[in-house]
Amino acid sequence: MLQIASLNSGSNGNCYYIGNETEAIFIDAGISCRETEKRMKRLGLLMGKVKAIIISHEHSDHIRGIQTLVKKHQIPLYITPNTYRNGGLNVDAHLVNSFMAYQSITIGNLSVTPFPKFHDAADPHSFIVTYQDTKIGVFTDIGAPCQHLIEHFQQCHAAFLEANYDEEMLEKGRYPYFLKNRIRGGQGHLSNTQALKLFIDYKPAHMSHVLLSHLSKDNNCPQLVQNLFNQYAGETEVLIASRYEETAVYTIGAGAAVKKELAVQGSLF
């Protein structure tokens, strides 16, 4: 079994927790160390279990909390050399580890497989986290679905899947034209329609949860996208990874999935 939670998901910061009974990792660290600690505590999760921070790319909403988190808790950082260089990071060298696409990272009994994605960053990656027979995908900040994404999505028992924008809201919204084109131009973010097509065409029968992630504050609506996915969800539970607070902790297994009681009360949105 694996426990998963989103500590925050959006352009204001991204951090995803994945762990087993003895060790855990963060994918990205885009909120402050203090806020990360507060949210972990509310969920009943221990910072001491976090044995690695693995970074998808260098944009500030994915690396903002790294330096303080790594220094305070002495957590090893896994990052590609290009991402480290372009992120302007300054982390003690003994805590910095590099990785390459397709080469698994071993963190205790967890295995993390990075693979490249379309995004306007130096060396961006998505990830599959495996423990025993259970696989969790982290698929955000993707300009367009590629064969790598399709192949890995089909393996997952649960996934953090980007559904960043509604096409009509983006088109009619206040963003300048160049930014709209950056978002929808194939190196930016997945739209609701793109994410839904991936979900409909390639969702495996064993996927128990999908956490829709990195929703735009201005160009999407949580209820809209949840209703859209619910029509095609079947036995898969559709959840929203909020940009304002942590989700519940979900226990995901190859045979079954059980929702842990939410450790903090309040609106998802």
Image (cartoon, rainbow, N blue to C red):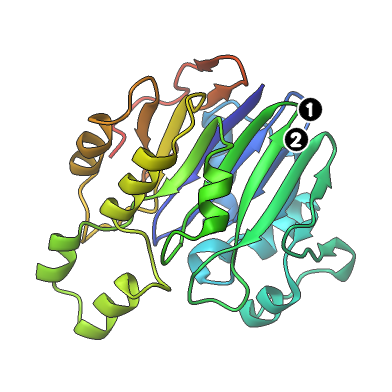
Q: Quadrant of residue 223?
A: top left
- Identify the image quadrant of the C terminus: top left
Residue found at the very far left of the displayed protein: 172
Left or right, 51 with respect to 114, comes to right
Residue 157 coordinates in the image, percent (x, y): 55, 30
> Quick one: 35 or 267, which is closer to the camera?
267
Q: Amino acid at mark 2?
A: Lys
Residue that carries the numbered disc 1 in the rendered image? 22
Q: Residue at x 63, y 30 (%)?
A: 45
Identify the amino acid type marked 1: Thr
Up the image or down, 20 lies above or below 200; here it is: above
Q: x%, y% of residue 67?
A: 68, 65
Mark 2 / mark 1, whichever is N-terminal? 1
User: Pointer 1: residues within 10 angstroms few (<14), some, or many (20+)?
Assistant: few
Of the numbered discs in the image, which one, if any, rests on residue 64?
A: none
| Residue 154 in the image, given as x and y percentages of width and height | 53, 39
**Residue at 21% in and 56% down:** 166
In which image quadrant can residue 28 be found?
Answer: bottom right
Residue at image location 24% in from the left, 43% down from the top? 225
Residue at the extreme right: 94
Query: What residue does disc 2 label?
Result: 49
Q: Are marks 2 and 1 in contact (CB under 8 Å)?
A: yes
Label 2 residue SS: helix
Front residue (pair 133, 183): 133
